[in-house]
Amino acid sequence: MYDLTIIGGGPAGTSVAVYAARKRLKSVLITQEWGGQSNVSEDVQNWIGIPHISGTDLGKAFEAHVREYSEDVVDIVSPAKVTKVERIDQDGQQSFKVTTEKGETYESKAVFLGVGSARRKLPAKGADTFEHKGLTYCATCDGPLFSGRDVVVIGGGNAGFETAAQLLAYARSVTLLEFNEKFLADEVTVEKLTKNENFKAIPNVEIVEVTGEAFVSGITYKSRENGEETKLPTGGVFVEIGMIPNTDMVKDLVELTERNQIKVDPYTQRTSIEGVWAAGDATDGRYHQNNIASGDAVKAIEDMYGFIR
Ligand SMILES: Cc1cc2nc3c(=O)[nH]c(=O)nc-3n(C[C@H](O)[C@H](O)[C@H](O)COP(=O)(O)OP(=O)(O)OC[C@H]3O[C@@H](n4cnc5c(N)ncnc54)[C@H](O)[C@@H]3O)c2cc1C
């Protein structure tokens, strides 16, 4: 019986593992890979203390940091995919059983979920080809690289409008394209942004193709009303059409939002089930970044320590 099972090798999971090792909590960390979502980034520029690091080097640094302290305290199971987390009640004693794809099981007093999420990919021709070549899924990470350009944001929810607001600080112009007839963002946000003369928002359109040569240079969209196609030259495409949290394995255990994010108490990072904590992109936290995932995870382990001990 472990004290703690940590699921995830991104900033949330590895932060918990480093603290758990130093607190001598007998733990097991299970992850599919190290580094998490920013693994695909060529240059992460806002991991505090390191001005430039590639996503893969960040992943290696996470693994090395955990192994530095793991000794006989934190067992590492990688690569492995967790498929289910269950609560067990035996003689009034609660524990958790974590099962992997290969059928291995791990039992612990507490569980930490640092399972992250995946960005919903743009379903349009050329979107895969131009990913990291002018098409990006993270404005906070890559926005400043597009300074002075005419850029496009895809998605008219709050995330899309917030991305557009951020980009207006450096881009020459921002055009936002939305699939639905109406923007899903808060009315006040839409109203505020549409007053900016460098901003234009177009609803009820479908993205047909992302075009370019070595780098993105245009986008073609189609009116959903009359089918008319428009080719828009652009120096960058920011996609904000939602996230898919990796929360399948706990869908029968903890409370999730309608978007399948784990509901947490932001004061402690506790989930709806005693003994289960979560942090990072899999949660319903308002903002998602590496530093936030790590900081919230540290909050969680401080809270877990009291529970376990
Ligand atoms: C393209 C891109 C670029 C980004 N660039 C930046 C940036 O420059 N700066 C920044 O601060 N943020 C950036 N972000 C956001 C940042 O990556 C996330 O906020 C951060 O990774 C969230 O950390 P996390 O630990 O919650 O989850 P993740 O990083 O998603 O890690 C989840 C971990 O859980 C593991 N896992 C998932 N499911 C299972 C399972 N079933 N079984 C076992 N293991 C599992 C995964 O293998 C992974 O190790 C970027 C995001 C994207 C998509």
Image (spheres, rainbow, N blue to C red):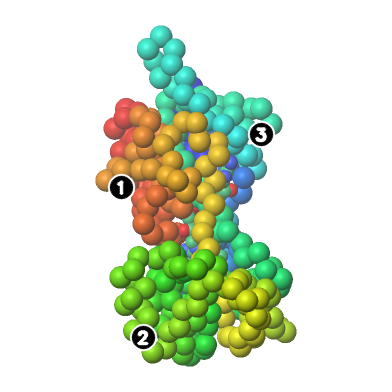
Q: Residue furthest front?
A: 226
Q: Label 3 is placed on what type of residue? A: Glu
Question: x, y (%) of residue 131?
Answer: 64, 71
Question: x, y (%) of residue 161?
Answer: 42, 71
For the residue labelled by badge 1, is the local secondary structure a helix, a strand or a loop? loop
Q: Residues within 10 Å of mark 1 (few under 14, many from 20)?
A: some
Q: Are marks 2 and 1 in contact (CB under 8 Å)?
A: no
Label 3 vs 2, first from the N-terminus: 3
Residue beneath the point at 57% across and 81% down: 236
Image mark for residue 196: 2
Of 196 and 276, the residue lying toward us: 196
Image mark for residue 101: 3
Q: Residue furthest left?
A: 267
**Which one is in front in this view, the residue at disc 3 or the one at disc 2?**
2
Kindly report the distance in space between the C-alpha atoms of the residues bearing marks 3 and 2.
Answer: 51 Å
For the residue labelled by badge 3, is the local secondary structure a helix, a strand or a loop? loop
Q: Is residue 229 above or below residue 247?
A: below
| Image label count | 3
Q: Are marks 3 and 2 in contact (CB under 8 Å)?
A: no
Regarding residue 105, the answer to whether it shows in the image is yes
Residue beneath the point at 48% across and 38% down: 6
Residue beneath the point at 50% across and 81% down: 175
Of 244 and 282, the residue lying toward us: 244
